[in-house]
Image: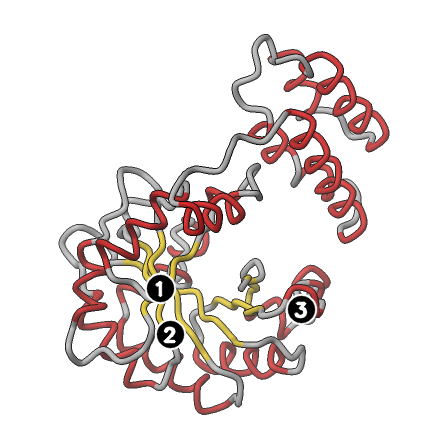
Amino acid sequence: MVYTEFISSDGLLYEGRKSLQKLHIFDYERPIGIQIYGHDPLKMTEAAKIVETAEPDLIDINFGCPVKKIANRGAGSGMMRFPDLMCQITESIVKSVKKPVTVKTRLGWDENSKNIVELALRLQDTGIHALTIHGRTRSQMYTGKADWTLIKEVKNHPAIKIPIIGNGDIGNGMDASMAFEKYNVDAIMVGRASVGRPWIFKEIKHFFEHNAPMPELSLAQKVDIAREHFQKSLEFKTLPRAVYEMRRHFCLYFKGLPDFKEIRMRLVTENNPDEIFKLLDLIFERYQDL
């Protein structure tokens, strides 16, 4: 299943264009969860009611985002410092909507406050249907390695009855396989590893089916996927946002190509979609024999 990019509760309540646009979902995306964030119980509950009208398969609450401008005002993983408020918000949303509610969070605020085991039990008591745990604290941001040992401790706790979804550093099929075999999670969530590499989900499925890595995609396949990805960005987002948000994807699509600096600089500075499509053609022409 997929989750939408998280949506600000304030943005929904004040009918922000970008926030409302994220509520548009399509049948081919199902099953899909719409994810919201915020720190005010009343606003979060009202936002969840708005989300429910979009008919997602579930509503997810983000208590895991570590970005400074979000966490420092108490939203996202900033809520790790206020477990009572976190549970109050969650319980209020669960009681106010009919759709299943899930939560995503982290191990704790910092190394000295890894409270995820106790928190998982409390969140389960609010009535959520599943819990996703990212194996880092908020203070770690995305540095170092994700620690899955506490995720396993939560999953193996005798009082935990809801599915536990593991998240953090799933970069290939072997990582995914280990998450199930070593840490006993019910499911895995892939986030950053899919940026510039959307075929990672196919790689993981291939590993499960064949117990071997999927053959590397050809450059022609990567160019075709990048072209389709960019076309969809243009269809669903306005300019120049559709171009800006593709830039980091383009860099990762073609990471490792020799003498690529000049084309990469043009990809991340060019604003004209037609010229960007020409650059993708140029990449194929120049590197097709590799």
Q: Residue at x 57, y 44 (%)?
A: 198
Residue under the image location 65 percent in, 79 percent down: 55
Q: Secondary structure at mark 3?
A: loop
Seen at 66% across and 12% down, the residue is 289
Which residue is labeled 1 in the image?
165
Q: Position of residue 44 (x, y in %)?
A: 49, 77
Q: Are marks 1 and 2 in contact (CB under 8 Å)?
A: yes
Between disc 1 and disc 2, whose residue precedes? 2
| Label 1 secondary element | strand
Q: Where does the C terminus fall, quadrant-wise?
A: top right
Q: Amino acid at mark 3?
A: Leu
Crowd tier of the residue under label 3, counting other residues whose Cα lies within 10 Å: few below 14, some 14–19, many 20 or above: many
Distance Cα–Cα, label 2 vs label 3: 21 Å
Say left or right for 238 vs 80. Answer: right
Numbered tag placed on residue 52 in the rendering? none
Amino acid at the residue labelled 2: Ala
Q: Nearer the viewer, residue 285 or 60?
A: 285
Residue 180, horizontal then vertical, whole percent: 30, 57
Q: Report which residue position mark 3 lands on.
A: 23
Amino acid identity at mark 1: Ile
Q: Residue at 82% across / 33% down in the picture?
A: 273
The kind of secondary structure element at disc 2 is: strand
Q: Residue furthest top?
A: 259
Residues packed near mark 2 inside 10 Å, few (<14), some (14 to 19) or many (20 plus): many
**Foreground: 268 or 190?**
190
Q: CA distance from mark 3 to mark 1?
A: 24 Å
Instruction: Relative to 174, say whether 224 is above or below.
Output: above
Foreground pick, 45 / 61: 61
Q: Which of these two is toward me, 227 or 97?
A: 227
* Residue 130's disc number: 2
